[in-house]
Image (cartoon, grey):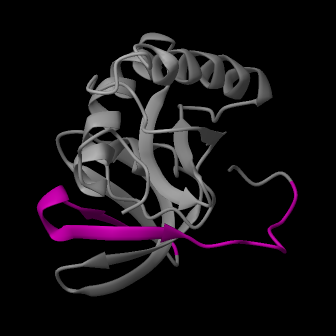
């Protein structure tokens, strides 16, 4: 088992770190997207993924890194503390890449203007996200035809990389 939170399984350690770090990251205006803890020799590699509407910059990564490091280092003198990581760790804080699946309304909101491949109840859909409503779902422009897909019929989506998008287009 990789060194993680003292006395916990990897899944429990992940859930604990999500619970511990979520409020800390939210307090400074960012969303905690994920935490992963893996073994890296005698250390743990702690990968923290954060995002925000409009994205995050290096200053935001530095702020979050400091806060997360402080939280992980708290109570390390007590090996039974749920905050203590068992042993040394390397911390990586980053934003999600373009390959992150769109699963939450905030992910879809951040994809407005982007070309997306979505999985729906009626099959795959390729279109540009034009609007996101917490109540109604996601509106896509599919070859000039606007289609609204309710949340109940929408599964996952993935932003499509566009290398030749015309200059001046939104997104």
Query: Residue 146 appears in which quarter of the rendering?
Result: bottom left
Does 145 appear in magenta? Answer: yes
Does 110 appear in magenta? Answer: no
| Residue 18: x %, y % from top left | 33, 36
Segment colored magenta: 144-167
Q: Residue furthest right?
A: 167
Residue 58 higher or lower than 71, as above or below: below
Query: Residue 138 appears in which quarter of the rendering?
Result: bottom left
Number of numbered discs? 0
Taking the image as shown, residue 168 lies to the left or right of residue 69, namely right
Viewer-side residue, 148 vs 26:
26
| Residue 10: x %, y % from top left | 31, 56
Quarter the N terminus occupies? bottom left
Residue 47 higher or lower than 93, as above or below: below
Viewer-side residue, 97 vs 147:
97
**Residue at image x 30%, y 45%?**
13
Q: Residue furthest left?
A: 152
| Residue 84: x %, y % from top left | 39, 27
| Residue 67: x %, y % from top left | 56, 16
**Residue at image x 48%, y 24%?**
72
Viewer-side residue, 52 vs 40:
40
**Residue at image x 41%, y 51%?**
108
Taking the image as shown, residue 120 lies to the left or right of residue 3, namely left
Query: Residue 120 appears in which quarter of the rendering?
Result: bottom left
**Residue at image x 26%, y 26%?**
80
């Amino acid at each position: 088992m990789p060194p993680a939170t003292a006395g916990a399984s990897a899944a429990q350690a992940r859930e604990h770190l999500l619970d511990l770090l979520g409020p800390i990251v939210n307090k400074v205006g960012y969303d905690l997207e994920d935490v992963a803890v893996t073994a890296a020799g005698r250390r743990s590699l702690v990968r923290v993924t954060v995002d925000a509407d409009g994205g995050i910059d290096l200053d935001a990564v530095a702020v979050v890194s400091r806060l997360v490091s402080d939280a992980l280092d708290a109570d390390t003198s007590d090996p039974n503390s749920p905050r203590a990581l068992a042993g040394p760790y390397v911390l990586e804080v980053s934003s999600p890449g373009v390959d992150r699946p769109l699963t939450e309304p905030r992910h879809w909101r951040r994809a407005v203007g982007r070309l997306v491949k979505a999985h729906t109840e009626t099959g795959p859909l390729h279109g540009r996200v034009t609007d996101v409503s917490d109540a109604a779902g996601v509106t896509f422009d599919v070859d000039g035809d606007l289609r609204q897909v309710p949340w109940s019929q929408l599964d996952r989506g993935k932003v499509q990389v566009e290398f030749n998008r015309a200059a001046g287009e939104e997104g």
